[in-house]
Amino acid sequence: MATTTTTELPERRRFNVDEYYAMGEAGILTERDGIELLDGELFCKYDGRRRRFTVGEYYRMAEVGILAPDERVELLAGEIIKMAAVGSRHAFCVDEFTEKLMPLAISGRARIRTQNPIQLDEDNHPQPDIAVVARMDYLEAHPLPEDVMLLIEVADTSAGFDRRHKLPMYALHGIPEVWLGDINARTVEVYDQPMAAGYGRVRVFDAGEMLSLAAFPDLEIPVGDVMPE
């Protein structure tokens, strides 16, 4: 079973007039770009295409205050996308996964990053709920695909979007293993064997089964501990 790609995205982050002019002052937009603001979105008046952003422009918007420090957004396919609010059940699952993975960090075998970005390329800067990455200091840059051993997404209302968009994106960039924790189904879907078209294998684990990482098969995690009833 292989996942498939899609361009469908959830709600985009919209901009107001002040933010539009602030982008010009910050050098993100220039007059020759021919970008106009229509209903909170940016379009090129020459060809009607929506204006997309690079990682550098995304962080420049944060530096100049267009994006607030606590704003829940991520950069996907050059689009600034609103992230769903973190409910209590979602937070519980993330905490439980993090606690179960922490022995890898304590033993120095990996670093566990919670709700922090990874940089896939110049157009994709997602923030997975958990990333198990190579043990190094990421002071100057966020982890790249080759640094990632496992990504975990916990989904309540976003499970469909994660399957349709995020998983194919992760596969395309060679992320070796992704777990999707479906809170409503109380299951964890394990995706591996990445290919350009998506993941070649999908396995579903329910509350009575154990999870183990391909990179660290000795660490086992009971699904029932990380997926609440």
Image: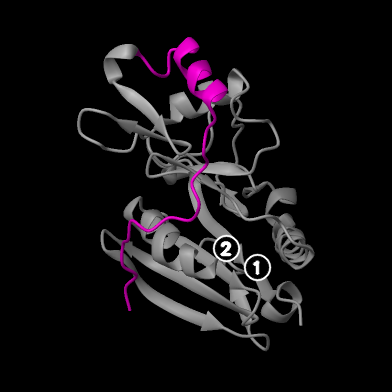
The kind of residue on which mark 1 rests is Leu
The kind of residue on which mark 2 rests is Phe
Disc 2 crowd rating (10 Å Cα; few below 14, some 14-19, many 20+) is few
- What's drawn in magenta, residue-wise? 1-30
Which type of secondary structure does the marked residue at label 2 adopt?
A: loop
Question: Residue 127 or 196: which is nearer the viewer?
Answer: 127
Residue 170 placement (x, y as % from top left):
41, 55
* Secondary structure that dominates the magenta span: loop
The answer to whether residue 110 is left or right of residue 92 is left
* Image quadrant in which you'd find residue 168: bottom left
In the rendered image, the vertical position of residue 125 relative to residue 96, given as above or below: above
Residue 74 placement (x, y as % from top left):
53, 43
Disc 1 crowd rating (10 Å Cα; few below 14, some 14-19, many 20+) is some
Q: Residue furthest front?
A: 39
Determine if the magenta segment contains residue 84: no
Q: CA distance from mark 2 to mark 1?
A: 6 Å
Which type of secondary structure does the marked residue at label 1 adopt?
A: loop
Which residue is found at the position 60% from the left and 68% from the top? 157
Whether residues under marks 2 and 1 lie with C-beta atoms below 8 angstroms apart, the answer is yes
Q: Which residue is mark 2?
A: 216
Of the 4 image quadrants, the one containing the N terminus is bottom left
Which residue is found at the position 40% from the left and 66% from the top? 164
Of the 4 image quadrants, the one containing the C terminus is bottom right
Which residue is found at the position 45% from the left and 24% from the top? 56
Determine if the magenta segment contains residue 17: yes
Residue 190 placement (x, y as % from top left):
50, 72
* Image quadrant in which you'd find residue 53: top left
Q: Which residue is mark 1?
A: 219
